[in-house]
DNA sequence: CGCCTTTGACCGGCGC
DNA sequence: GCGCCGGTCAAAGGCG
């Protein structure tokens, strides 16, 4: 029952308020003829929603329905006999006749109303309980004789007490959820503000760099479209590293000769016969990291680039599958034994578009081989299906988080971990940021399955459980769910941060990538975020037996505004574009490794 | 036949 | 300079 009550505050809150959920209960609204009933109709509706979405409640039994039907007079049946769909209809039955309500109310008040209800802080409980017990007690008392009336009276009192206690508990939980939502909203706003601040700072830097960059462009003889800086990972254009075209990305800097060097923000200094990265284009793709940096004047920028391009997002999840399903197509291009881990590490690159710089590594955790660690790097340079978009958004947003945090940290502005805690107050155990690692890495730990009860522990915590089996993510696009918790929030923060947006760019075209990338490079967009959000929320609620968890997911998706229904609805199916490596089992390592461990990933 | 995985080789970075 | 290690390439072979 605890889970069901979660919906109470959510839907009465203007932020999350999607009262459409309740529109299938019009009779509920109509069943309250008096104003003081109407005042709290939301809670009635919510209660009815709970029951509508789930099997009849286990802790509160309302025998009123049966009796109420007995109460009906033949004359009323013709007009008011209603078919109630798939839910407890104690509301519906009560609305047959105002007279019945009045009688019942009188009855209730005679029995215990004056004693029990006059102390209610508000009229809700009084009214609620009046309505609930009305048919039970009134009908019984009207029919039964005195003896059974006493028994029924006691029983009614007992039920009344139970119901009242339950309502109080629901109210408390309602309040708790309100607080939680307020907290989330507050954090969200704070982070938005912070992001705006960072953006403004970044814009200043960018402006300065632009001036310097103009000089370099002149010197280098290249006039290329300005590349804009993204707080996050590099953009895609950077690494159009057709494997067939470049033998080895970093081996000689020959990439500079490719046609993309302008887009990469790399120009050839004809005076010095050297590659020069323009200062105004620090936002480089994954592969650009290998471009030699010879210009000492861009040292700081290059350091930032070095950080950015190597930022990684690591996802830890329990899975018996060789890979988690993140909705993308991957091609394995290598496998190595990593030191300190008996399981080989597999290297994949995205094959959904030629030259997509995104890569990922998949490896079993050394300590617990049931845990699959997937590390993502880079941004896609092509549209993605929703499921894949989700993970892409996550990785990019997480990287953005990491990088903005680390860069700010360098200025003493913000500790990335503080940022992480700010952004993810819920997830001290779910997300960690390691800026000290060889590559700055955000780790999202899904192995510690959030207990739905955690939702109720503290208003400051939101842990989002996953609808499908949390212990096994096999074949489930588990990672695609992440953005609802993590990535999309950031993604939308960048969207909200109007300062980041190009004036001439349709915000709806903004992907998780650089804010000012060429539009052609942007990913497929959540252009129907509202619809998707509602759908996702509905689906989450409908699909998840754990109502609290579902509501939490709904809150998240609503707040994030960019949920992808596929990720929820189809979380047990493999998207059409899904990863292909069905036989991507780890095999004994290759020559470089001393591996003797053959691990068919369990 | 095209796409994929496998796997030996190669390269760069880093520490000693 | 050397060796280790992570990461990548690319030829060879498998598979549908």
Image (cartoon, coloured by chain):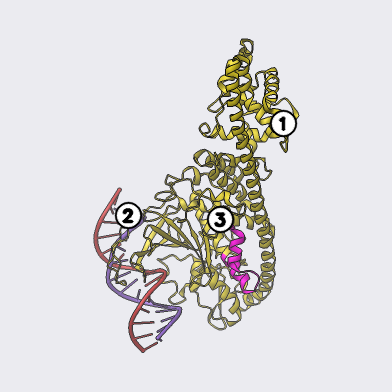
Chain colours: A yellow, B purple, C red
Q: Whole-percent x and y of residue A518?
A: 59, 59
SS label for mark 1: helix
Marks 3 & 1 on one chain: yes
Q: Whole-percent x and y of residue A539?
A: 53, 40
In space, the residues marked 2 and 1 are separated at their CA atoms by 60 Å
Q: Is residue A112 above or below residue A429?
A: above
Q: Nearer the viewer, mark 2 or mark 3?
A: 3
Q: Is residue A436 magenta?
A: no
Q: Farthest residue to the front: give it.
A: A147
Q: Which residue is mark 1?
A: A38
Chain at numbered mark 2:
A
**Mark found first going from the N terminus, 2 or 3:** 3
Residue A312 tag number: none
Quarter of the figure with the N terminus of chain A: top right
Residues tagged 2 and 3 counted as in contact (Cβ below 8 A): no
Q: Residues within 10 Å of mark 3 (few under 14, many from 20)?
A: many
Residue A486 tag number: 3
Q: Whole-percent x and y of residue A402?
A: 56, 65
Of C10 and A159, which appears nearest the observer?
A159
Marks 2 & 1 on one chain: yes
**Residue under the point 54% across and 56% down:** A393
Magenta-colored span: A402-426
Q: Is residue A144 above or below residue A252?
A: above
Chain at numbered mark 1:
A
Quarter of the figure with the C terminus of chain A: bottom left
């Amino acid at each position: 029952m605890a889970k069901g009550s979660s919906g109470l505050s959510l839907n009465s809150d203007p932020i999350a308020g999607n009262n459409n959920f309740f529109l299938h209960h019009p009779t509920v609204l109509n069943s309250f003829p008096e104003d003081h009933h109407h005042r709290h109709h939301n809670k009635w509706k919510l209660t009815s929603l709970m029951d509508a979405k789930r099997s009849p409640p286990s802790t509160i039994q309302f025998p009123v329905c049966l009796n109420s039907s007995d109460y009906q007079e033949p004359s009323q049946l013709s007009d008011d006999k209603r078919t109630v769909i798939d839910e407890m209809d104690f509301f519906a039955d009560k609305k047959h006749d105002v007279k019945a309500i009045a009688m019942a109310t009188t009855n209730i008040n005679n029995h215990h109303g004056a004693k029990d209800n006059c102390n209610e802080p508000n009229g809700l409980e009084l009214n609620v309980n009046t309505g609930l017990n009305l048919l039970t007690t009134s009908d019984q008392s009207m029919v039964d004789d005195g003896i059974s009336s006493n028994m029924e009276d006691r029983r009614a009192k007992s039920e009344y007490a139970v119901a009242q206690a339950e309502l109080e508990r629901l109210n408390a939980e309602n309040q708790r959820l309100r607080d939680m939502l307020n907290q989330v909203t507050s954090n969200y706003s704070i982070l938005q503000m912070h992001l705006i601040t960072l953006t403004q700072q970044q814009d200043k830097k960018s402006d300065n760099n632009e001036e310097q960059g103009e000089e370099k462009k002149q010197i280098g003889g290249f006039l290329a479209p300005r590349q804009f800086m993204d707080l996050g990972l590099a953009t895609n254009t950077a690494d159009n590293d057709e494997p067939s075209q470049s033998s080895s990305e970093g081996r000689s800097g020959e990439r500079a000769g490719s046609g993309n060097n302008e887009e990469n923000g790399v120009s050839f200094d004809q005076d010095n016969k050297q590659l020069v990265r323009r200062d105004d284009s620090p936002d480089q793709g994954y592969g650009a990291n290998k471009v030699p940096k010879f210009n000492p004047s861009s040292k700081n920028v290059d350091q930032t680039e070095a950080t950015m391009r190597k930022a990684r997002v690591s996802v830890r999840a329990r899975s018996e599958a060789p890979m988690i399903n993140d909705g993308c197509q991957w091609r394995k291009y290598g496998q190595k034994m990593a030191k300190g881990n008996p399981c080989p590490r597999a290297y994949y690159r995205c094959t959904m578009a030629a030259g997509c710089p995104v890569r990922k590594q998949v490896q079993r955790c050394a300590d617990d081989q049931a845990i699959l660690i997937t590390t993502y790097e880079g941004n896609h340079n092509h549209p993605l299906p929703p499921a894949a978009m989700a993970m892409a958004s996550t990785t990019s947003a997480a990287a953005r988080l990491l990088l903005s945090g680390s860069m700010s940290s360098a200025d003493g502005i913000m500790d990335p971990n503080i940022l992480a805690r700010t952004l993810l107050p819920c997830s001290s155990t779910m997300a960690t940021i390691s800026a000290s690692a060889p590559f700055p890495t955000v780790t999202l730990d899904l192995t510690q399955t959030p207990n739905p009860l955690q939702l109720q522990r503290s208003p400051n915590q939101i842990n989002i459980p996953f609808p499908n089996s949390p212990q096994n993510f096999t074949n489930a696009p588990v990672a695609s769910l992440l953005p609802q918790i993590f990535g999309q929030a950031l993604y939308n923060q960048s969207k909200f941060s109007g300062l980041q947006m190009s004036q001439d760019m349709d915000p709806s075209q903004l992907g998780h990538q650089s804010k000012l990338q060429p539009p052609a490079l942007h990913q497929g967009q959540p252009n129907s975020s509202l619809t998707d959000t509602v759908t996702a929320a509905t689906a989450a609620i409908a699909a998840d037996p754990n109502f609290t968890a579902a509501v939490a997911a709904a809150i998240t998706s609503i707040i994030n505004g960019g949920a992808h229904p596929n990720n929820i609805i189809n979380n047990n199916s493999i998207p059409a574009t899904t990863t292909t490596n069905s036989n991507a089992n780890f095999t004994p390592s290759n020559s470089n490794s001393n591996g003797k461990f053959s691990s068919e990933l369990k």
